[in-house]
Image (tube, rainbow, N blue to C red):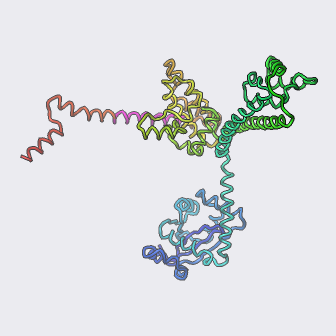
Amino acid sequence: MGKKDTFVLYESSAGYSLFEVVQFEEIGALLEASQENVTDYARFCRSVKLKAFHPFENAEEALDNMNAVSEHSVSGLLQSFLEANMSKKATLGCVESNIATAIKEATSLNVTVDDTVREVLRGVRLHFSKLVGNISTANVIQTQSGLGHSYSRQKIKFNPARSDNMVIQSIALLDQLDKDLNTFAMRVREWYSWHFPELKAIVADSYMYARCAALIQDKGSLFADGSEAKVEKLLEIVGEQSQVDAIIAAAKTSMGMDCSPLDMYNVTNFTQRMVALGAYRKQLALYLSDKMAIVAPNLSTLIGDTVAARLISKAGSLQSLAKAPASTVQILGAEKALFRALKTKGNTPKYGLIYHSSFISRAESKHKGRISRYLANKCSIASRIDSFSDEPNNAYGKVLAEQVEERLAFYESGKAPQKNLDVMKKVARQLAEENGDAMDVDVDSAGLEKKLKKKKKEKKEKKDKKNKEEETPKKRKAEGEETKSEKKKKKKKSKAE
């Protein structure tokens, strides 16, 4: 490697820089001797000279080039910059192997990546403003800050499918609202029952009770003059005329105390707030359902929106859930029980959050553990499809749910379910036909089937070999021959004598 034909590329937030390394071997020697010598600018600038510098015209150009570098691709600007300032015989040093490969393919230049290049670029980064000359350290810091913010902002925007953080916050809020509404419902019943105690025996549902209380307010208004409009609205709430008649009859003979206007105002005000909170809870549940259809359509189709959202929330993200093995998914949410069982050496839990799935509740008690293990396996597959698919849909989720149904039927009646491979191939073929790639799927399926057959054959051969090795000593002993261990013992005994 010659002294005058070695360059290093430095990609900064201000622009692309090309530095000629005048004494490349000396830099290598400095690396071996002491890395602190690179920090000495007077000595470093004798070995490294600025060849060319192309500043970015604006923030948009800087961001485009940064995206290209982060994706290990060569932008048109970088390619033209290198071709204009380097000869084909020269060697270019890069800090990262992937971008080096991309530059080599795009420009046919000789590109190298080693510790010496990294050490040179460390010095360039340290003395960049001095080496370039027409840019201050403050400007470099400012451009780095601006580009960093732009890049991060774009990365967040670029990831719309990963709205799992919205799912996590929504399910947390939904759970909190359920607790709050339950507490508020108890308070409304106790408070309003002082005035109209018979109502809670007629209307059992807490949300409906709150709506009735907010509408009725003073029980005497149900049978007073001009109460027809209120009775019609009450019918809309409860839905049955018989219930409305029972409420009116109870109001006429009620044993409840009379309330002052101020007391009734406070009771009604609190009741209306609870009704509004209940309406918002329904709206939030619909929002979560729509969000899950975008973020994890297969998982939500398999086990339902709420359970799927809780699994994602507990795992931390959809990707974390996808990376977790099925055994972890099975007991996710039952960590306390698991660690208690490990500590006391008792039985570990069979299920965690997936217990709330309808499949577990429908299974017989003796099959709950088996079906939870099977369901966790399918949840793991569904989450991986959702996480790593470019355009996820619920096609796989539907067939995975059917497989769990078949497994439940198998435990009840003994009817054999379909093979997982056949089911997956069928769905893949359907999706490929929709996209016009049926031929590719057939080829891939054939290759996969061959691989599976080969793997099964190798596994069987390995097992047979192991069984044969285990049977040989027993066979020899049965036939009266000495085994290897007996021969060794006999040899040791003869030596000792």
Q: Is residue 351 visible?
A: yes
Give 4 or 339, whichever is nearer the viewer: 339
Work out which residue is located at the far right of the displayed protein and give it: 225
Q: Residue at horizontal 61%, vertical 39%?
A: 310
- Magenta segment boundaries in residue numbering: 442-462
- Quarter of the image where one finds residue 218: top right
User: What secondary structure do most residues of the magenta stretch adopt?
Assistant: helix
Q: Residue at horizontal 43%, vertical 76%?
A: 33
101 left or right, relative to 262: left
Magenta highlight on residue 460: yes
Q: Residue at horizontal 66%, vertical 59%?
A: 151
119 left or right, relative to 479: right
Work out which residue is located at the far left of the displayed protein and give it: 497
Give 243 or 479, whichever is nearer the viewer: 243
The mark tally for this picture is 0
Position above or below: 182 against 126 = above
Give 99 or 43, whichever is nearer the viewer: 43
Give 280 or 324, whichever is nearer the viewer: 280
- Location of residue 268 in the rendering, given as x and y in whole percent from the top left corner: 82, 35
- Location of residue 356 in the rendering, given as x and y in whole percent from the top left corner: 59, 31
103 left or right, relative to 157: left
Q: Residue at horizontal 56%, vertical 73%?
A: 124
Position above or below: 382 against 41 = above
Magenta highlight on residue 459: yes
- Quarter of the image where one finds residue 210: top right
- Location of residue 286 in the rendering, given as x and y in whole percent from the top left corner: 72, 35
- Location of residue 373 in the rendering, given as x and y in whole percent from the top left corner: 50, 32
Q: Is residue 399 visible?
A: no
Position above or below: 284 against 90 = above
